[in-house]
């Protein structure tokens, strides 16, 4: 089978897969295939849906790569405050995420969300990233969550030494 016929066959497989997926079928995403490389286009509501489209397409045998040009709709002006609120709602509902460990805030007005906090569990960071990507208006999730125990500050060390001195 020549490349053109193979690309046409892959294109039909990609389009069919996207149209059958319960989470993506309502978006009428478009896909083109050239030499086994897929170009995805369209608009979805969340970063999670954009990532899902690319993940699904990558599973088709014969696909060499995916250029994900799918846009995320903001349905008008969504402020950092709105995005932060929605992300924190998603974090609160996410299994495996403790809001005492991880919080989020949107920065820069472009849908970028920064996760902050500290946890001992790397899986909690991934669960938070997943949850944040479900919120409307999020285009990118950056993690600044630290792993492990917090280093004591110089002030903490000083106070512990002072307290120890008094006990002797």
Image (cartoon, rainbow, N blue to C red):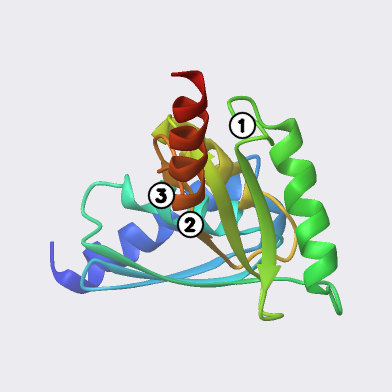
Q: Is residue 79 left or right of residue 91?
A: right
Q: Quadrant of the C terminus?
A: top left
Per the image, the residue denoted by label 1 is 97
Quarter placement of the N terminus: bottom left
Figure check: 63 above or below 22:
below
**Does label 3 or label 2 sit earlier along the sequence?**
3
Outermost residue, top side: 168
Q: Secondary structure at mark 3?
A: helix
Q: Is residue 26 above or below residue 137?
A: above
Mark sitting on residue 55:
3
In front: label 2 or label 1: 2
Image-quadrant location for residue 97: top right
Quick one: 7 or 64, which is closer to the camera?
A: 64
Would you name the residue on which mark 2 appears? 144
Q: Nearer the viewer, mark 1 or mark 3?
A: 1
Q: Secondary structure at mark 2?
A: loop
Q: Position of residue 37 (x, y in %)?
A: 27, 69
Q: Quadrant of residue 106?
A: bottom right
Residue at screen point 32% across, 44% down: 59
Q: CA distance from mark 2 to mark 1?
A: 15 Å
């Amino acid at each position: 089978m020549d490349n053109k016929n193979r690309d046409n066959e892959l294109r039909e497989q990609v389009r069919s897969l996207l149209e059958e997926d319960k989470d993506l079928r309502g978006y009428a995403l478009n896909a083109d295939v050239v030499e086994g490389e897929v170009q995805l286009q369209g608009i979805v509501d969340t970063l999670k849906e954009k990532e899902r489209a690319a993940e699904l397409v990558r599973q088709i045998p014969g696909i060499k790569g995916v250029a994900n040009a799918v846009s995320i709709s903001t349905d008008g002006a969504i402020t950092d405050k709105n995005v932060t609120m929605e992300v924190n709602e998603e974090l609160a509902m996410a299994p495996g995420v403790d809001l005492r460990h991880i919080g989020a805030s949107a920065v820069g007005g472009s849908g970028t969300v920064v996760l902050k906090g500290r946890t001992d569990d790397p899986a909690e960071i991934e669960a938070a990233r997943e949850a944040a990507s479900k919120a409307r208006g999020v285009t990118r999730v950056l993690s600044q969550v630290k792993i492990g125990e917090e280093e004591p500050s110089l002030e903490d060390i000083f106070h512990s030494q002072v307290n120890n001195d008094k006990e002797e």
